[in-house]
Image: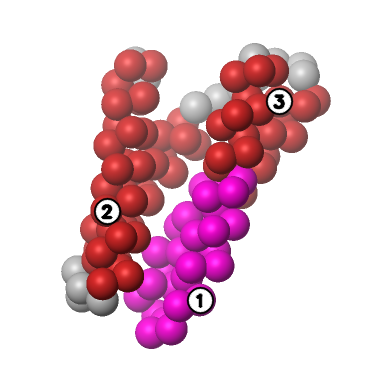
Amino acid sequence: MNPKLNATLMMTGAVVLLIGASLMITGWTLAPYIYCIGALLFAAMQMADRYDGDDLVVKRLRRQQLFGCLMLLVTGVLMFIERHNGWIATLTIAALLELYTAFRMPEKE
């Protein structure tokens, strides 16, 4: 896939994901749908990105990044099945993992 298109789709997914999470706090009924569209787009683009090198640190960071991606998807499921704020915990875990890897990955690649 074109790296520029991948980056654009990932950024679009991140923005839609953020809008959905913000709207979820307001209690709007369509907010989980908006969040899930963004989360699926972001996750698909992040999973499509591959690392085939031999650096163990980058491989570990990549696994953490994929786990954060999985937590974003779990957050979307929790938004639908739970009427409490448990989804905030998984979203926080995902955000922390994604933030950590975003700062560490460019340094190692």
Name which of mark 3 and mark 1 comes first in the sequence: 3
Q: Residues within 10 Å of mark 3 (few under 14, many from 20)?
A: many
Q: Which residue is mark 2?
A: 19
Q: Residues within 10 Å of mark 2 (few under 14, many from 20)?
A: some
Q: Which residue is mark 1?
A: 86
Q: What type is the residue that disc 1 sits on?
A: Gly
Name the outermost residue toward the right. 56
Name the outermost residue toward the bottom. 83
Q: Nearer the viewer, mark 3 or mark 1?
A: 1
Name which of mark 3 and mark 2 comes first in the sequence: 2
Going 60% across and 29% down the picture, which residue do you hit?
103
Going 27% across and 37% down the picture, which residue do you hit?
12
Left or right of 104: which side holds 95? left
* Residue 3 shows in the view: yes
Q: Residues within 10 Å of mark 1 (few under 14, many from 20)?
A: few
Q: What type is the residue that disc 3 sits on?
A: Val
Residue 18 drawn above or below residue 98: below
- Give the spatial CA distance, label 1 vs label 2: 18 Å
Spot occupied by residue 102 in the image (x, y as percentages of width and height): 56, 31
26 or 106: nearer the viewer: 26
